[in-house]
Amino acid sequence: MPQSDEKQKALRGELYHAFVPELIRERRRCSHACHRMNIAGEVPRRRLVELWRDIIGDDRPLPPPLSDAEQDAALFDDEPWVDLPIRIDYGTNVRLGTNVYINVNCTILDTCLVTIGSRTLIGPNVSFFSGTHPLDPELRNGTKGPELGKEIHVEEDCWIGGNVILLPGVRIGRGASIGAGSVVTKDVPAFHVAAGNPARIIRKIETKMDPTQRSRMDGKDTVEVAGAEKPMAQLAEQLEANTRDVKPLI
């Protein structure tokens, strides 16, 4: 089915009107699909995968069911794990890789494409805001004015901490970690830790997964096992030191 002019504008990141009949129908469809998954209760893994695919508009057929429940569930080991509830605007602009985990209370405003790479872990209460509005209130004009968006891309093997907000247009590089409570306004390079509001780069992650580090780390048996709490503590110490250096206003 051909896309409307407004939907094509939205996907291109141009100004578009969200409250046209087609886009209202698409948001309602996704809202109902999210509701069905959120209230599903204790159901087999197969049913959860089916409900998730309904949200994102994935109509690929599921594999034939197996009589053994555990073996049947194992058929979907590579499918995303989505803890509920979840809230998504359109669903059809969301792309997830394999072995992705999304914790509870995730919000995805997928005005534009939102991609999450394989083996990425998403903490609780994370928000992906690919949509935004004009700053000029006359142009913004409530529900009658236009809005716009930019794509959000999270590459493979990332970890997004709880309560993180990703704003329109950002890209999180492969293997990066984002500290809890951060607001990401700019791209984060691969294999780095970023945290804060706005998020800033704290340091590089030591890993053989990074091709630029592999030769230097050959022969090392250890890998970095500390969580994000260590760089977050370092950031807190840095901010505290900066605060001590600020003179009070008189």
Image (cartoon, helix red, strand yellow):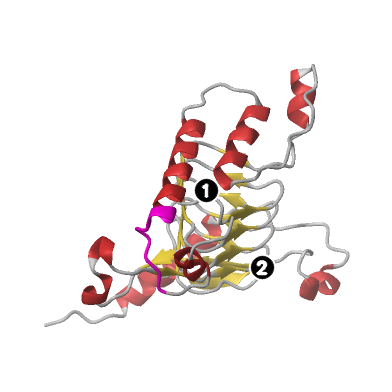
Q: Which of marks 2 and 1 is in front?
A: 1
Is residue 140 one of those drawn in magenta? no
Determine whether, in the image, residue 232 is placed left or right of residue 53: left
Residue at label 1? 123
Q: Which of 34 and 249 is in front in this view?
A: 34
Foreground pick, 191 / 128:
128
Q: In which quarter of the image is the C terminus?
A: bottom left
Residue at image point 43% right, 48% down: 25
**Residue neighbourhood size for the residue with mark 2, other residues' Cα within 10 Å, grouped as few (<14), some (14–19), many (≥20):** many
Q: Which mark is residue 244?
A: none
Distance (Cα) linking label 2 and label 1: 18 Å
SS under mark 1:
loop
Q: Which of marks 2 and 1 is nearer the N terminus?
A: 1
The amino acid type of the residue labelled 2 equals Phe
Q: Residue 30: horizontal and vertical position, in percent?
A: 48, 44
Residue drawn at x 49%, y 51% is 90
**Residue in the image at 49% along x and 31% along y:** 36
Q: Which portion, as a residue range, is magenta?
A: 15-23
Q: Is the magenta stretch mostly helix, strand or loop?
A: loop
Asked whether the beta carbons under mark 2 and mark 1 sit within 8 Å of each other, the answer is: no
Q: Which amino acid does label 1 sit on?
A: Gly
Report x, y in % for residue 66. 80, 22
Numbered circle sitting on residue 191? 2
